[in-house]
Amino acid sequence: MEDLLFANDIAYLPGIKAAVHTGSTAKVGKAVASSYTPAVTADSPAIYDLGNIQDIAYWGDANTFPQDIIALAEKSTELPSLLDWKARAAQGAMILPYERYYDEATNEWKERPITDPTIVNFFLSETTKRYYREAYTDFYWFWNVFPDLIKNDEGNKIAYIGTHEASWCRWYKMNPKGIIEKMALSSQWASGIFDDKGPYGMKLDVVNPYDWNLVESLKKNDKIKRFVYPVSYPSPGKAYYQLAPWDGIRTSGWLALAAQIPAFKKAIMENQMHIKYLIRIPTNYWPAVYPEWDSLKPEEKTAKKKLKLDEINLKLTNVENAGKSILNEVGYDVNGEKLPGWDIDVIDDKLKDGAYIEDSQEASAHLLRALGLDGTLVGSGPGRNLNAGGGSDKLIAFNMYCALLGPQRQVVDEPVYFIARYNGWYESHPFFFIKTIEASPQALDTSRKVSQQVQEQWPAKDSSTAPKN
């Protein structure tokens, strides 16, 4: 049997999971609750000495904003996967070159895929696919993309497009005309040191996307072989680094709260006393049982209390004692009023009822709102008996979501459109454009339609030639 815990006139009987107040004026609820102090504290970004990077435009007060965002997001069970969902949805099933043309027979503008091998091979290359994958990831995490473009040996074509890791990128401060000319690349910003000639630092040229004559001026500049073509989605009041709209979930504290809930529940489950009963023994019980009570020393009183508590714990603990009761004598004072007897209250177990589930659901709802996601697409968050919508709801919500991706896709497509102009693709395809082929969820009745088409094409009388499933 576990040892009885006794301190300051408050006891815990492990056998029956009961807290016992033995008659002092101490407040049981306060004493029990104070035994646990949450160990979770809010993280604050470290402040570093930024002595030798005074020419860099800081990203955050300590120049570690992306690193702080990543560290905070890694504590979330939802944010990274939801950002990944948005990045994958924006990429669609495939990204291909198309062109518009005018059909004189129908007097309509139509579109068709471009079949030029050079252009098609560019879009189907692993390099371009990787660009889109990494660019959309950085876009939804930070609202900023840092595309890396490299000319061919002759300098008349762009042969490569990729991205620099967004969290490693920092702009140099603008020149007097408000133009950014250089970018610093380093994985060591937390150290507060940047060395563009060291093993962990690079200084790269940056082109001005607002330059109307950028293609011609860049072709004439033989010194620039590799450069950054900056793109981002605008956010109000930001000059160097745009701010993702979901950042409010961080500054409001909801993201940190969501991360604290599992740690808090874990700490409670590991540290709290699992109390089922609260027993109060009135102070005047002890003199009634022990006539010499008032003359006893404090340690003698404590010893007698322990004996009584051991008796209670032993009597009600074992299975063979089930059904036994505690004799609780009640007396009356000189006025005939009943003296207080023992009070035994049952304590509800809040954890078994799903404590903090409501808080977790609320934090999850705020996160979905911040990310602009419909809960029917990704689920409504943690909890019980949640309805994430039916198949039709998901299909409609997905189509509506994809219909609004155009402006964001234009941001990631912009460097590729620049390559099209630089490489002369518009000369042979004046109405060139980039088309994202959507990932198409099948409707609920798709299998029935396919079956019907098979039956129509291969009638039952010629079933021997029909394709086998």
Image: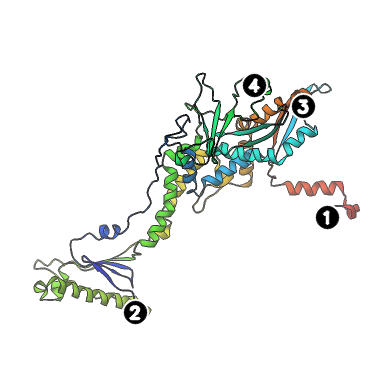
Determine crowd level at label 2: few under 14, some 14-19, many 20+ residues with C-alpha closer than 10 A. Answer: few
Quadrant of the rendering where the N terminus is positioned: bottom left
- Disc 1 or disc 3, which is closer to the eye? 3
Residue 360 at x, y = what percent? 45, 49
Q: Is residue 180 left or right of residue 112?
A: left
Q: Which of 202 and 434 lies nearest the eye of the viewer?
A: 202
Q: Earlier in the sequence, mark 2 or mark 4?
A: 4
Q: Which of 236 and 319 lies nearest the eye of the viewer?
A: 236
Marks counted in the figure total 4
Position of residue 378 relative to residue 424, above or below, is: below
Check disc 2 and report the residue beneath it: 321
Q: Which of 102 and 455 lies nearest the eye of the viewer?
A: 102
- Disc 3 or disc 2, which is closer to the eye? 3
Check disc 1 and report the residue beneath it: 468
Q: Is residue 298 left or right of residue 462?
A: left
Contact flag, marks 2 and 1 (Cβ < 8 Å): no
Quadrant of the rendering where the C terminus is positioned: bottom right
Check disc 4 and report the residue beneath it: 214
Residue type of the residue flagged with mark 2: Asn
| Residue 404 appears in the rendering | no
Check disc 3 and report the residue beneath it: 110
Per the model, the C-alpha gap separating discs 1 and 3 is 37 Å
Q: Mark number for residue 273?
A: none
Position of residue 209 relative to residue 370, above or below, is: above
Position of residue 215 relative to residue 439, above or below, is: above
Q: Earlier in the sequence, mark 4 or mark 3?
A: 3
Per the model, the C-alpha gap separating discs 4 and 3 is 30 Å
Residue type of the residue flagged with mark 4: Leu
- Disc 2 or disc 4, which is closer to the eye? 4
